[in-house]
Amino acid sequence: MENTPKTLALPQRKTRQYLPEDFEVTDWAALEPYFEELKTRALNSQEDLEKWIADRSELESVLSENLAWRYIKMTCDTQDEALTQAFQFFVTEIEPKASPYDDAFNRKLVESPYVQGLDEQRFRIYLRGVRRAIELFREENIPLQTEISTKQQQYGAIAGAMMVTLDGEEMTLQRAADRLKQTDRAVREEAYLAIQNRRLEDKEKLDDLYTELIQLRHQVAVNAGFENFRDYMFAALGRFDYGPEDTFSFHQAIKEKVVPVTRQLDRERKELLGLDTLRPWDMDVDPSLKPPLEPFKQGDELLSKTIEIFYRLDSFLGDCLVTMREMGHLDLESRKGKAPGGYNYPLDEIGVPFIFMNATSSLRDVVTLLHEGGHAVHSFLTRDLPLNAAKHPPSEVAELASMSMELLTLDHWDIFFPNQEDLVRAKRQHLEGVLETFPWVATVDKFQHWVYENPNHTVEERHQNWVRIFEEFNLQEVDWSGLEHIKPYIWQKQLHVYEVPFYYVEYAMAQLGAVAVWKRFKSEPEAALEGYKNALSLGYTATIGEIYAAAGIRFDFSPAYIQSLVDFVKGELEQLDVK
């Protein structure tokens, strides 16, 4: 599908300077001598310290990549018990033994008399993170964190096993959800209820799992000297640039500036569909009652067309995806036994990430691959940074990479939608989805604040407060009568709540940033794209604000800034109506 076939020289792993070239992570006994050597090595000069930092970074890269492959293989086939055991072995037998060494290394670094001589620009963010890690570390939390990791993995297994049967065909929930775009309202209702009823079969199991995770996480926070897990996570996630009160203000700004717009879009949808009331199964169908968009048939077509889009935008972007394809670093199609969701997993040694997703044949899948492709480009742009820690910026930056890519590629979506009418429909659906991101993120984030501020709540209180928060932000135009038993459990579909707590508000922050990048791109495309790549190339060697500034935008979620960017998106939607 690309204009010209690409045969690239595939990246090679950098020559190891510390570990043997043939070293593989098998068990703790093989690793321990290297941890001990780093712990006891004498550091008698500035040069010694910098070599020690580089050797530690190499060891971290090797461990990180080994864990990555264990996780990737497990999520690709949750029904293979051996793959699950391999992942759990790392979590239970290697991570708990490595954790005390990490703390010892951090202390060895900051206590070295030569730390003051480290280059400020190169090491300031790294040292800031090291000092924060020392503040958070507690030996008694190691077994708790091991148990948490094991329990988090259970969510993927439960969700990955969920199947429904429609018209005699057994299918994943992702594939069933494609029927919510069908023009026949009865088909949509049947699919919606089948999906929800299947989720409800595991509602107690998922509630119990969440209760266990809440209690374990709260204990970790208390052990570390925090009042609650929310405050602990703000520290652990490195949120140096904002605090809980800022996120509350962000929620309120979304409620004031975005929710009225999404409510208006819902009213327009109801009118276009000719309905007296909107129901939950009416929200994904095309409002002009056209058949669902089908941008591709199979995963290989999705990939080849996405590669062509990337090449149109910038040759480097296309080369990234071609490299991943040639190395087999993609698993795109939905199938039974595969964990839900999608991700781009960095592979720190080779520097070529892995994209995992559950494609069926929808616009959502196109956006997902563009999104994860943005993360992948970020990995390529940071692969040559010398410090492993510098390759992992905070989510506010990581999600800027992915969400911006969705919008930067928008003018090339004709590759998927050669028909102009379909192209306009696709762009409209996506831009409306951009606006709808904000209320949903605010809902999930505000819910998590309540959960961890009240760790001893009952399950019934949890359900009541979810519904209260949900109704504050979402779908006020939708009639839920007769479905009251479903609403209290909607949050259970959000894997972030289980697997990466509090990693969610960043999506809304980054969505603002992505709209700002796109707005700049519309007026000065070359400078905006160059700024985007330059910002991502910084990895985590600068603050969030500095990285956003390198992209030519602001890290800002004030009401006025939100209003200006919402108005821009509304203007783009109005131009689509003209076309």
Image (spheres, rainbow, N blue to C red):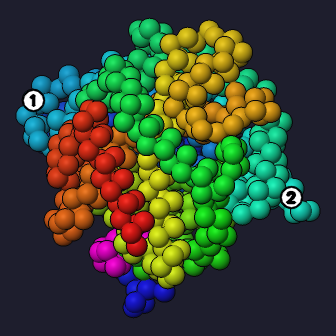
Q: Position of residue 313 (x, y in %)?
A: 31, 74
For the stretch drawn in magenta, the main secondary structure is: helix
Instruction: Kindly identify the residue that appears in the image at 36 percent across and 72 percent down.
Output: 411
Give whichever of discs 2 and 1 has the lower sequence position.
1
- Name the quadrant containing residue 558: top left
Number of numbered callouts drawn: 2
Q: Within the magenta stretch, is there residue 506?
A: no
Q: Is any atom of residue 575 visible in this view?
A: yes
Question: Which residue is the site of mark 2?
Answer: 166
Could you tell me which quadrant the C terminus lies in?
bottom left
Q: Position of residue 359 (x, y in %)?
A: 63, 64
- Name the quadrant containing residue 522: bottom left
Picture layout, residue 410 above or below residue 221: below
The magenta region covers 311-322
Q: Position of residue 497 (x, y in %)?
A: 57, 32
Horizontal side of residue 237 vs 314, given as left or right: right
Q: Residue lying farthest left?
A: 117
Q: Is any atom of residue 392 visible in this view?
A: no
Q: Position of residue 139 (x, y in %)?
A: 47, 17
Picture layout, residue 153 above or below residue 229: below
Amino acid identity at mark 2: Leu
- Name the quadrant containing residue 316: bottom left
The numbered disc on residue 116 is 1
Nearest to the observer: residue 137 or residue 369: 369
Q: Residue lying farthest bottom?
A: 4
Amino acid identity at mark 1: Gln
Instruction: Kindly identify the residue that appears in the image at 44 percent across and 37 percent down.
Output: 260
User: Which marked residue is nearer to the observer: mark 2 or mark 1?
Assistant: 2
Q: Residues within 10 Å of mark 1 (few under 14, many from 20)?
A: few
Q: CA distance from mark 2 to mark 1?
A: 65 Å
Q: Residue lying farthest right?
A: 168
Q: Secondary structure at mark 1?
A: helix
